[in-house]
Image: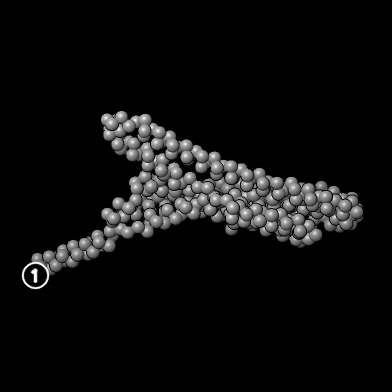
Amino acid sequence: LMDQIGNLYLLATIHCRAYLVNVVCESHDSSDEALLLPSRWWTVQLLSAIIIVPFALLHLWELLKLRLDIHGHSAAALQRNLFRKYLNYSDASKESIHPEHLQFAITDEATVLSTGYTDVLDLLKTLGKLFINFYFIAVNNPEAMWVISLMALTMIAWAAYRNLCFEIIGVRAQSAHMVRRSQEACSNFELISEYYLRPQVNAMFAESSEELRAQLVRRKTQHSNTKFLLEWLSPVFVGIYTFYAIRSVFDKELRLGTFLATCQAISSAGAACLQVDHNYLDICRTFRQLRSITEFLNKKTDLMMWKQANRHRRAVTKQIIRDSDS
């Protein structure tokens, strides 16, 4: 909820800039009546305070979020639960997993999954920013709603096309495979050395490393293409709106401040679309980690056996105490 204060601040700054151009900078008598304070100078001071003071509060909130450390606490809780669960595994559960998979889950997947949780919070914040821009245009310049709506539909169409035609590339399996190769080499070093297998083992590890590098390049290429495609949204649609609406400004049908504020809202909405897509991809990449950690946390343990044994010992102890008292 506190993250949405930044979006309210964005709405306030857009209104202030539109008001500054439409009213404060106008020299007509009608604009004097619309001033918030008796003089233009004091009105400018008030607008400056509205822009500066809330930003300081937003800065303090960001510092407080760092102190809360939601990401760190979430990762630590997952790591502790995974390790505690492993210590209580049954023999069959321990044999069903590779140690390197558990190590990777504790050191890497728990951190990635906690990042996914914070990405969900960031996504909600960005969606709020997108709503604020839609709201400003719908209230102050409804004739421009088609522009921002078309921009949002373009982003949704691209996301749907990408999900249907491309795979969101992950590197977890290949990273775990490379870790397993290195651990096997370390645990069997004497055997590898005595049988002169160092070149073969080195070649296998190099192959795993190359496969991981290729997957990382594919994922970076996918991310770069998406990033630059969505970065086109803001300049293209601001240009389209400028071409469409500038005649209304010349004809005095649209006030200059409203026009400039609408351009800012369209540009801000384009940046929000890019951030929404970025958060969406980050969240999707955590699904594999979520599935893996869920499997680890739901494997069978021998706690029930130890619980029954403990209750049996307590019952035997109580019986011995009663027999000794009698």
Q: Mark 1 points at which residue?
A: 326
Residue at position x 43%, y 39% in the image: 208
**Quarter of image, res 258:** bottom right
Q: In the picture shown, does residue 190 fall above or below 59?
A: above
Q: In which quarter of the image is the C terminus?
A: bottom left
Q: Can residue 99 be seen in this view?
A: yes
Relative vertical location of residue 25 with respect to residue 310 in this rendering, above or below: above
User: Which residue shows up at 69% across the image and 54% down it?
Assistant: 154
Badge 1 amino acid: Ser
State the residue in front, 296 or 201: 201
Image location (x, y in percent) of residue 295:
39, 56
Residue 56 in the image, given as x and y percentages of width and height: 64, 47
From the viewer's perspective, is 86 left or right of 158?
Answer: left
Relative placement, left or right, of 73 versus 1 is left
Percent across and percent down for residue 122 are: 58, 52
Element at badge 1?
loop
